[in-house]
Amino acid sequence: MAALMLQGTGSDVGKSLLVAGLCRALLRRGYSVRPFKPQNMSNNAAVTVDGGEIGRAQALQAIAAGIEPHTDMNPVLLKPQADRTSQLVVHGQVRGVLGSGNFRSARAELLGAVLESYERLKSQCDIVIVEGAGSPAEVNLRAGDIANMGFARAADVPVILVGDIDRGGVIAALAGTKAVIDSHDAAMIRGFLINKFRGDPALFEDGYRYVEEKTGWRGYGVVPWLSGAARLPSEDAVVLERPQANVSDRLIVACPILPRISNFDDLDPLKLEPGVQVVMVPPGKPIPVDAGLIILAGSKATIADMEAMRIEGWDIDILAHHRRGTPILGICGGYQMLGRKIMDPEGVEGLVTEVQGLGLLNVETQLTGAKALKSVTGRALGADFSGYEMHVGLTAGEDCARPFAFLGAECPDGATSPSGNVLGTYVHGLFGSSALRAALMARLGKEAAGADYRLSVEQALDQIAIEMEQHVDIDGLIALAR
């Protein structure tokens, strides 16, 4: 069995995408491969075949490897729910809350769980491709580390360091990493990759050789800007901070970026539609007056996000849109916010035990400690769909008599206002169904292109794998892994 770990000079250098690309490249070569991330921090999660949850990126990497996502692929998941606390998920199930005070000690105790999952994956395949988190250069986090060098040394896995040339300073980032980390950690790094290169790689040849000479690490390639990445779901909220171009003559679908927004990749399939422009509305900006649909995405802390919505004034925008007849759809936490009230008597989310919702649906939600985690199929808007549930809370009220969907044969989900213009559902992943996407577009007076989102993701992964074969020494990485 072979294994290789990709770590980065920082966050958002493209580790997740490169792991997915390597998994698909190895699969195309006939290898049995598994992705693995010891510890992830993300509110974008996916339901697994064994009834747990893992980071969305690892679910995508599983697709790239041609297998179903499993909790062993991401044994420790931290889901931020406040500035200094995160929900702790171990082997797919909620285990409690980590705060800044107990983060290091509690994290170190999870190394055993991480190694258990890794050993199980090793026994199932030819090669495991491991993804680090953040950067090993964050030496202030080294004590108790299980995400980068703590895991690499415990499992004796060679490391490739990824640098992002697009953000600038990649030479300093690579050489600087070696300068600041422990010598035993540095010995685990066997090479590097340059990622997100635009233009002629020959222009960087001198810099490439300088990094090799300065660090003693071998370069394994210069990866170009991978255009196929735009068709893949994004895991990190970092992408929400980037400016988006305005395009006229399109249906504008607006989604406010609340502080604890989660599973915002629900909107990705809508971007396939030529007649749609998805606008992620950042703090400090109003919801566009010309929006033809408002979507409230999921939330890791619904009560806190409801309060943040009022601080931003987005509640006023949404109510104004509602008076003008703009359709509004809430998914999971967004569905809860559309109701009259959200109650948290057990303190699941924190000290605030009750908040008023937008009042656009005649429903109320009570949060509970139990978490629903399951894949579902159903029918909504006259179309079949598949998706998943991942939420805490029970929602009830008069508008639930008009369900948004029926799951399976006859289990109702969600609610609809008497006017039919306000919709709420607990199901994520709805728009991945081309039939449901077409039904929604028709309801909004637009014709859908009918693109198959899942096929688009598969084609993008193949495209990325082909480009990596052209620019990365895959044979050398395989030999290193062995």
Image (tube, rainbow, N blue to C red):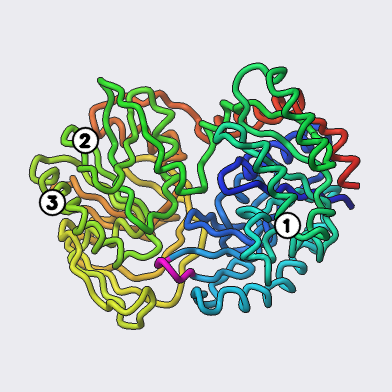
Tag 2 near tag 3, CB within 8 Å: no
Which segment did they paint magenta?
A: 81-86
Q: Would you say 417 lies left or right of 334 here?
A: left
Q: Earlier in the sequence, mark 2 or mark 3?
A: 2
- Magenta stretch, main secondary structure, is strand
State the SS at label 2. loop
Residue found 33% across the figure and 41% down from its top? 280
Earlier along the polypeptide chain: callout 2 or callout 1?
1
Q: Is residue 261 magenta?
A: no
- In terms of depth relative to the viewer, which is nearer, 105 or 81? 105
Mark before the other along the chain sequence, 1 or 3: 1
Q: Which mark is residue 291?
A: 2
Q: Which quarter of the figure has residue 356?
A: bottom left
Camera-nearest label, 2 or 3: 3
With respect to residue 401, does 454 lie above or below? above
How far apart marks 1 and 3 lie (CA) works out to: 50 Å
Residue type indicated by callout 3: Ile
Question: Looking at the image, is mark 1 or mark 3 nearer the viewer?
Answer: 1
- Left or right: 351 in relation to 427: left
Kindly identify the amino acid type of the residue bearing the numbered disc 2.
Answer: Ala
Rendering coords of residue 256 (x, y %): 29, 47
Q: Position of residue 474 (x, y in %)?
A: 82, 33
Write down the residue under mark 3: 316
User: Is residue 243 shown to the viewer in this render?
Assistant: yes
Residue drawn at 75 percent across, 50 percent down: 178
Q: CA distance from mark 2 to mark 1?
A: 49 Å
Classify 10 Å Cα crowding around label 2: few (below 14), some (14-19), many (20 and above).
some
Cα–Cα gap, marks 2 and 3 = 14 Å
- The tag on residue 181 is 1
